[in-house]
Amino acid sequence: MKNYQLTVNDLVIEAAFDEENVEMIFYPLLKKWTELQKQKDRRIFVFLAAPPGCGKTTLALFLEQLAKSDPEYTPLQAIGLDGFHHEQTYLNSHFMEVDGQTVPMKDFKGHPATFNVPFLLEKIKEARYQDNKWPVYSRKLHDVVHDQVQLKEKIILLEGNYLLLDEAPWNQLLEYCDDRIFLYSDVAILEERLIKRKMQGGLSYQQAQSFYQQSDKRNVEFTLASDPQPETTLLVRDGIFYLE
């Protein structure tokens, strides 16, 4: 394993990646995308989908760093789906159906219904042939902030839970996806990681477990139950990636 410094949510972290994974999986992916972008002669979008807790954001940022460190590969830009949540004012005033009951959207933030998919589709269409600015999700404001990231690279690695969902309106995105990766892990591992993440944010174990049962567990199940039909499927276990 080799340590790399990455900036995740404005924090510099150390992430370890297996050097064999880098040589056998990640460099070939970068080569594939480089060749694909040259062939299509336009900006391309690669979708990286995964359940919560898999480390998709860290992997996306690592691939960005890896591509930019070697002139053999076309630089890529990693960006997350979270900026396409509906704004908090919208969530506060709208409702959705969960288990046959009408519930406030704000109580299920992160559910597929809480994202503004038409806005995402509009941004992707526009970005195929011109640079544009994308929103981000502020963890300080707990809300969307618009026009924060300038898309500039020819390869965009978009990561998020539901990018490969085969249901409306998410399946409209697939027409504009040039390559797709699905990353997953064992459900028990994801549960442990997600509860630990909430505890690090200040919740007690009981609160974190309750949040997992109400929210994160549903989102994990949504993602794993979909039929993403990826070009590449990776299982991550103990920090090692396995090609499926």
Image (tube, rainbow, N blue to C red):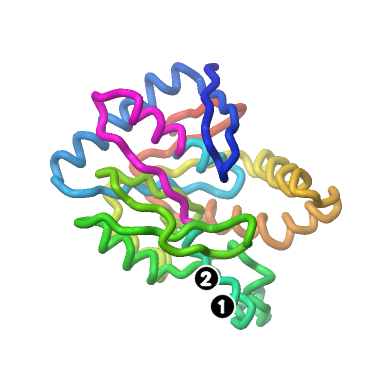
The reply to whether callout 2 and callout 1 are in contact (CB within 8 Å) is: yes
Residue drawn where x is 69% and y is 70% of the image: 107
Amino acid carrying mark 2 in the image: His
Quadrant of the rendered image containing residue 138: bottom right
Per the rendered image, the range of residues in magenta is: 61-81
Residue 206 vertical position relative to residue 32 in the rendered view, above or below: below
Residue corresponding to mark 1: 90
Q: Which residue is located at x 63 percent, y 61 percent? A: 141
Q: Dot 1: within a 10 Å radius of its alpha carbon, few (fewer than 14), some, or many (20 or more) residues?
A: few
Position of 96 relative to 161 (above/below): below
- Quarter occupied by residue 191: top right
Helix or strand or loop: what does disc 1 sit on?
Answer: helix
Please rate how many residues cluster around mark 2, counting C-alpha atoms within 10 Å: few if below 14, some from 14 to 19, many from 20. Answer: many
> With 103 as the anchor, is 156 left or right in this view?
left
In the rendered image of this protein, does residue 186 appear above or below residue 204? above
Residue at 43% from the left image edge and 48% from the top image edge: 79
Residue 12: x percent and y percent?
Answer: 58, 34
Label 2 sits on residue: 86
